[in-house]
Amino acid sequence: MEMQDLLLRYFGTVDLAEVGPGALPAGIDRMLVDLGLERDRARRFALWTLLYMLDSAPDLDVAFEDPADRDAARNMMDMIAAAEPD
């Protein structure tokens, strides 16, 4: 899944600055529902990553059954933290 595809699907735009105040929580809610229903590991990871970037991701033990997926998510979190300015 491409990040742009996710943004278009859940928010109707690839620019989050264009998302109205009520549309952001609604899109996040839809993403959380889809995350719970999704069985494809790669798609789950993509959904979880966008939710993480929007500060709305569920805990790793809730989102991922497979320890390898949890480790990958932790690595992604570390990479995002390292890229953030001090």
Image (tube, rainbow, N blue to C red):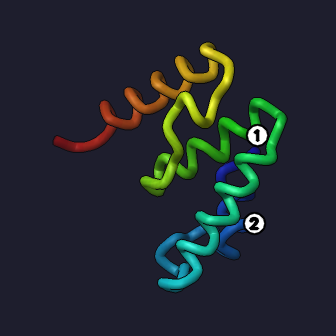
Q: What is the C-alpha distance between the residues marked 1 and 2?
A: 13 Å
- Residue 66 lies, with reference to residue 40, above or below; the image says above
Q: Quadrant of residue 31?
A: bottom right
The kind of residue tagged 2 is Arg
User: Dot 2: within a 10 Å radius of its alpha carbon, few (fewer than 14), some, or many (20 or more) residues?
Assistant: some
Q: Name the residue under label 2.
A: 9
* Residue sticking out furthest to the left: 86
Q: Mark 1 points at which residue?
A: 43
**Mark seen at residue 58:** none
Where residue 70 sits, quadrant-wise, is: top right
Locate residue 28, reporting x and y percent: 59, 64
Amino acid at pointer 1: Arg
- Looking at the picture, does residue 73 appear above or below residue 50? above
**Quarter of the image that includes the N terminus:** top right
Residue at 57% across, 42% down: 49
Residue 60, horizontal then vertical, whole percent: 53, 31
Look at 47% across and 76% down and name the residue there: 17
Quarter of the image for residue 19 reads bottom right
